[in-house]
Image (cartoon, grey):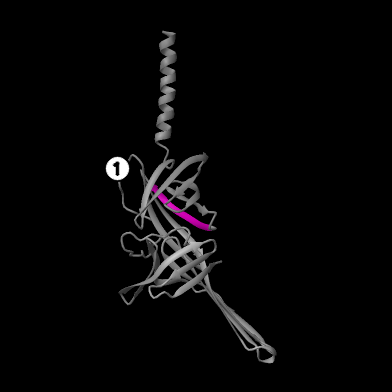
Amino acid sequence: MRFLFCFLITSLSLLAHVQSSAQDPLAGNYTATYNNDKLYLSLEQKSGSTYGGVMEDSYQTYVVTLRLSGSKVSGTAIESSMDLHFDVIGKVQGDQLSLSFTIDVLGEKQTMDLVFLRQGSGTTTTLNLDDEAPSKLSLPSGATHPQEVCGTWAKDEMYNSGSGDSYMGAGFSQSMTLLPDGHVAEGGSSTYISGSEYSGNSSGAGSGIIPGFAWYTMGNKFFLQITENGQLQTVPLGTYYVEGSNMLITGGNGEKLLLTRK
């Protein structure tokens, strides 16, 4: 009888523990899809209402920290190698976790929404975030955004002529940021000119994300996509090659464009 009593107590304790874990509103493994890429999110309870874990796609791994308040969550997602810092808000609804990721690029905020489904669940619900969903890029099937291409790139040009009292030198630099989701942000620019008796320089800040402008690769080909007045145009820039902090794009006519990572 004592053995049976101990067995029942142990079984009930184990059952309570299993039910408690199963009923955790946030911990678990989730999947989502964005721009034809599979994302994986793993969360575990750290202490109280704080959860931590990682989110992975085909190119990057983010350290995720979330705090749960009722059904709403908030926190951060950080990718250290590219210094990407997203603020995260969202809502958990059963086995569906709806998250909104916001990043500040050159003073302009960009937001993307993802809907994660807990693995092992077949349920779905409707996305119901308080924030308005951002416009989505419409990219062709097979479009990718490799990690080695993401980041801020600059085109530098220098000119020299004459010598002595007739010497003149000038330089120009223009940068752009290729975001992991395909958006493009205009970076800063700078210009200088100098001679034997004069010199001058100027610089300008970037204007942030360029509406209707996107980038992607397919194989070793680099493409720009422009949408204006409802019309979509795809511009094939050529083949690309990245080595270290340099990217070389070679057009179909053999013209080469060298970009330097900033």
> Is residue 130 visible to us here?
no
Using the rendered view, name the quadrant where residue 192 is placed: bottom right
| Residue at the (66%, 91%) spot, across then down | 166
Query: Relative to residue 230, is residue 167 drawn left or right?
Result: right
Q: Position of residue 180 (x, y in %)?
A: 44, 60
Where is residue 34, by image quadrant? bottom left
User: Taking the image as drawn, is residue 200 in sight?
Assistant: yes
* Coordinates of residue 115 in the picture (x, y in percent): 37, 52
Residue at image location 44% in from the left, 29% down from the top = 17
**SS of the residue at dot 1?**
loop
Q: Amino acid at mark 1?
A: Gly
Q: Position of residue 183 (x, y in %)?
A: 42, 66
Pick whichever, 37 or 14, lies toward us: 37
Q: Give whichever of 51, 61 is nearer the camera.
A: 61
Name the main secondary structure of what is drawn in magenta.
strand
Q: How far across and down, in percent of the image, does residue 187 sit? A: 52, 72
92, above or below 173, in the image? above
Query: What residue is disc 1 on?
Result: 122
Is 193 drawn above or below residue 56 in the view shown? below
Q: Is residue 91 within the magenta segment?
A: yes
Magenta stretch, residue numbers:
84-92
Q: Is 30 left, or right, of 172 in this rendering?
A: left
Picture residue at 52% right of the left edge, 65% below the top? 246
Image quadrant in which you'd find residue 216: bottom left
Q: Tag 1: Cα neighbours inside 10 Å, few (<14), some, or many (≥20)? A: few
Q: Is residue 210 magenta?
A: no
Which quadrant holds the C terminus?
A: bottom right
